[in-house]
Amino acid sequence: MRKVLEMWEVLNEILMQTFPSLPSLDHLNPNDRDDLELLDHYMEECIEAFIVNKGQLEPRFVVLLYDCKCDLARLLKKLDGVSDGYGYFELLLELSKEVLRHLKVKEARLILARQASQDCESNASTTRAASEITQKRPPGPVMEQGS
């Protein structure tokens, strides 16, 4: 955890030096710049939650961080190392890898898959119940008594 905290501190120092925006991304095309900014936003939130929760992270954030790490690695490879002059995104990638070493990505994916399956079953049973109620209703307009 100490290594994560040290890397987090370096990352924040880069941001303080370049405030109010991320390290200059003006030389990139708008789509790549947008992708980097979105990945930065999501990854920072996950890493910060990991630190605040003392090494714990909800399964959905574990999977999100892992997916963002993979996307960032692909994007940096595509950009051939010319994303920023401060090494911010390379450090963000290394920090995310370090955080993920402390987490169980496969287990988080299984938990999310189980939850999604349960949600689908729950929605299906609700739909079936609503369908059965509709089928039992007598044909024709429903009349209120006393009208």
Image: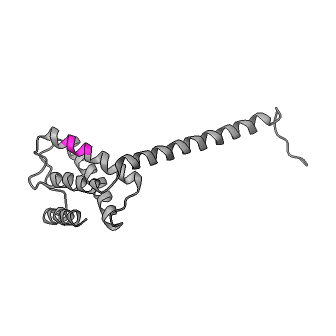
Instruction: Identify which residue, 111 or 91, lies in the foreground.
Output: 111
Report the residue at 14% width, 41% height from top: 79
Q: Which residues are magenta?
A: 70-75
x and y, in percent, of residue 46 in the image: 32, 57
Instruction: Identify which residue, 75 or 38, lies in the foreground.
Output: 75
Residue that lies at the very extreme toward the top in this rendered image: 139
Residue that lies at the very extreme toward the left in this rendered image: 85
x and y, in percent, of residue 142 in the image: 82, 40
Vertical order, 94 against 74 (above or below): below
Residue 12 picture quarter: bottom left
Chosen colour scheme? one colour
Is 73 included in the stretch rendered in magenta? yes
Q: Dividing the image into 4 quarters, which one contains the N terminus?
A: bottom left
What is the magenta segment's predominant secondary structure?
helix
Is 88 included in the stretch rendered in magenta? no
Residue 99 picture quarter: bottom left
x and y, in percent, of residue 103 in the image: 33, 55
Report the residue at 29% width, 47% height from top: 68
